[in-house]
Amino acid sequence: MTEAVSTETIIVALNRLDADPMNVRKTYSESGIRELAVSIKANGLLQNPVVRVGEKKGRYLVTAGGRRLAALRLLAEKGEVPASVPVECKLRHADQATEISLAENTIREAMNPADEFVAFTALAGETHAPADIAVRFGTSEAVVRKRLALGRVSPVLIELFRKEEMRFDQLSAFTVSDDHGEQERVWAALPAWNRHPSDIRAPLTGEAIRGSDKRLRSLAALRPMRQQAVRSVAISSTRMAAVMRLIPSFSNSWWRASLKRLPSRSRR
């Protein structure tokens, strides 16, 4: 049986926290840090960093939570939080540092995109404007609107996407319409081998050609002309073949007649 891990919760000032060299994650994207800083400002620190006692007195090393530390420092640089803002941390021993850091960065699973779309739609339903959501999550309003559009697709189709029975580009094609019944009808009507995004969008936007369309009648009128053209080509091909069969015998006859007309001296 695994022994229970002893974890103590402590409060440490931000300016007394340092990055732990034993943290296995060394690379962070600047855009990711900015987005996290916006989230922390709006919602607070949702997950406590894991720290260990540092070599210098009164200082602590952040073993797990390097991105959170970088985001908090960014907020402090902008003057949005005090440099000494208290941070709730989980204290662990140094001999566990590498394992803890590795576990946090590997034993986790990203949120399914479908769940994200639905969650954003739920936020919008709580009277949060797209611009407000964008600010709170550190992203652009355009990105939020795209997620909201995806979240408005039929729940039946979103469930297919969640089960990996539909591609993202196919799901995105349904955002041109808010009619769930029509979305589901189009998906069911298309054969599995021909569900290209353009084939999904066409009937939803009225771009598909209906049976009563005048263009179809025009095409039908051209059918007899096409059939006559095919017959003409077939007849021409047959006649050409007959001519080609006659060429060898015609050539031999022509040469024999020509030789007879020549003087006997020329034929030697």
Image (cartoon, rainbow, N blue to C red):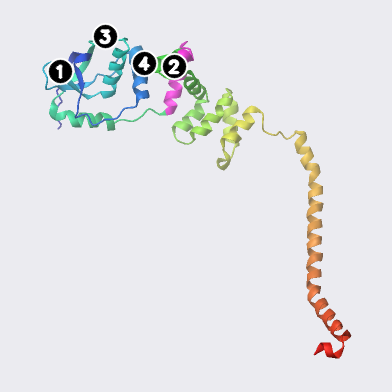
Q: Earlier in the sequence, mark 2 or mark 3?
A: 3
Question: In the visual, does 46 lie left or right of 176?
Answer: left
Compared with residue 222, is residue 172 higher up or lower down, i.e. above or below?
Answer: above
Give the magenta range: 113-131
Q: Earlier in the sequence, mark 4 or mark 3?
A: 4
Q: Give the residue type at disc 3.
A: Pro
- Tags 1 and 3 touching, CB below 8 Å: no
Residue closer to the observer: 16 or 162: 16
Tell me how far mark 2 sits from mark 3, CA to CA: 25 Å
Tell me how far mark 1 sits from mark 3, CA to CA: 17 Å
Tell me how far mark 4 sits from mark 3, CA to CA: 15 Å
Q: Earlier in the sequence, mark 1 or mark 3?
A: 1
- Tags 2 and 3 touching, CB below 8 Å: no
Residue closer to the observer: 12 or 195: 12
- Of labels 2 and 3, the one closer to you: 3
- Tags 2 and 4 touching, CB below 8 Å: no
Tell me how far mark 2 sits from mark 1, CA to CA: 36 Å
Q: Earlier in the sequence, mark 2 or mark 1?
A: 1
Q: Which mark is residue 59?
A: 1
